[in-house]
Amino acid sequence: MNIWIQAARLRTLPLSMSGIIMGSFIARWRISQNGGTWDWKIFALAFLVTLLYQILSNFANDYGDGIKGTDKNRMGEAEQRAVASGKITANQMKNAVILFAVLSFLATLALLYFAFFKENLMKEFYIFIGLGIACILAAIGYTVGKKPYGYLGLGDIFVFVFFGLVSVCGSYFLFTKTFSWDVLLPATAVGMLSAAVLNLNNMRDIESDAASGKKTLALRLGFKKAMVYEIILLQLPLLLMLVFMMMNGLHTEGKYYAFIFFILMLPMTALRRKIMNVKEPKELDPFLKQVGIMTLMMAILVAFGLNYF
């Protein structure tokens, strides 16, 4: 059981939960302004669906890289990978991927039933089923298949779209049944930080990826340019959230507590400086978890700032 828990890579879960928390609690704030009700069942199911998607993605990544030999001689955590190390066979991991794909789809159906089907919003129901299937395929397709998009340098785009835009805007829509353009700002903020984690991972593995033919964006850019790209990804999210708050007039209404998320500027600045000082790829490994936790903290602080202070 321990090896399966290790293969699930629980340290990646805070990042995947950030978008759901951000979108759901911005929706709660909007709904409370209009005197509506916010359904905890939808949030709990969305949380479960995201958890299953992330574990599915991690299992599929372990399987895909394992059978392609990409995980051999990697830095940091990579030597722990289950399939590459032989602790779990490729066939066992393939079955686990299939199982979690099915579980993810069933959980998605349950979520959409409560969010749309019970209210007879059939168009939205079927659109989100399509999005759910796209999420499942994206989770698997990063490293699995003849032309996995992670090996073509497209991983950053997919992570930005699914961890940011789909996660935040999708969860917002589940509650409000409407789309608001300003939600693209927090969605972009979460998406950029998610891409920052992936880029750090790919910078760490840049040497082994080059040897195995996994042409990530970091590899295509080279270590120095990938570092510049990383700093940009880490610099903008808090500014985007600041613009979102000001667009909604929270500064003019005297609701300055909504800006509590900005206390992250100091630790984010310190984190960026530490990353910029890294010279060897293997030294980047500890920062993956730190950026993920920082993303989660931003989402939680925004949620509390808008709803509870």
Image (cartoon, helix red, strand yellow):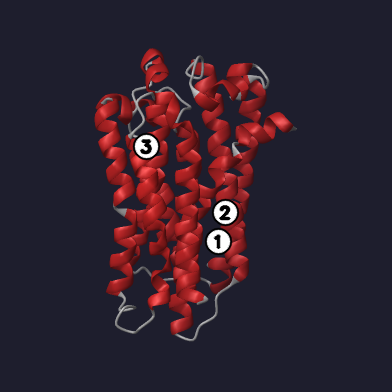
State the image quarter where residue 272 is shown: top left
In-image side of 77 versus 195 (left or right): right
Q: Position of residue 163 (x, y in %)?
A: 43, 49
Q: Residues within 10 Å of mark 3 (few under 14, many from 20)?
A: some
Q: In front: mark 3 or mark 2? A: 3
State the image quarter where residue 82 is shown: top right
User: What's the residue at 44%, 83% (across, down)?
Assistant: 33
Q: Report helix, strand or loop for mark 3.
A: helix
- Residue that numbered label 1 is attached to: 112
- Callout 2 amino acid: Thr
Q: Report helix, strand or loop for mark 2.
A: helix
Give residue 108's mark. 2
Q: Position of residue 81 (x, y in %)?
A: 58, 24
Label 3 or label 1, whichever comes before in sequence order: 1
Q: Kindly report the distance in space between the C-alpha atoms of the residues bearing marks 1 and 2.
A: 6 Å
Judge whether 257 appears above or below 267 on screen.
below
Whether the residues at callouts 1 and 2 have beta carbons within 8 Å, the answer is: yes
Q: Position of residue 236 (x, y in %)?
A: 29, 53
Whether the residues at callouts 3 and 1 have beta carbons within 8 Å, the answer is: no
In-image side of 168 versus 13 (left or right): left
In-image side of 302 versus 92 (left or right): left
> Can residue 252 be seen in the rendering of this structure?
yes
Label 3 or label 2, whichever comes before in sequence order: 2
Give residue 275's mark. 3
- Callout 1 amino acid: Leu
Judge whether 173 appears above or below 256 on screen.
above
> Can residue 148 be seen in the rendering of this structure?
no
- Callout 3 amino acid: Ile
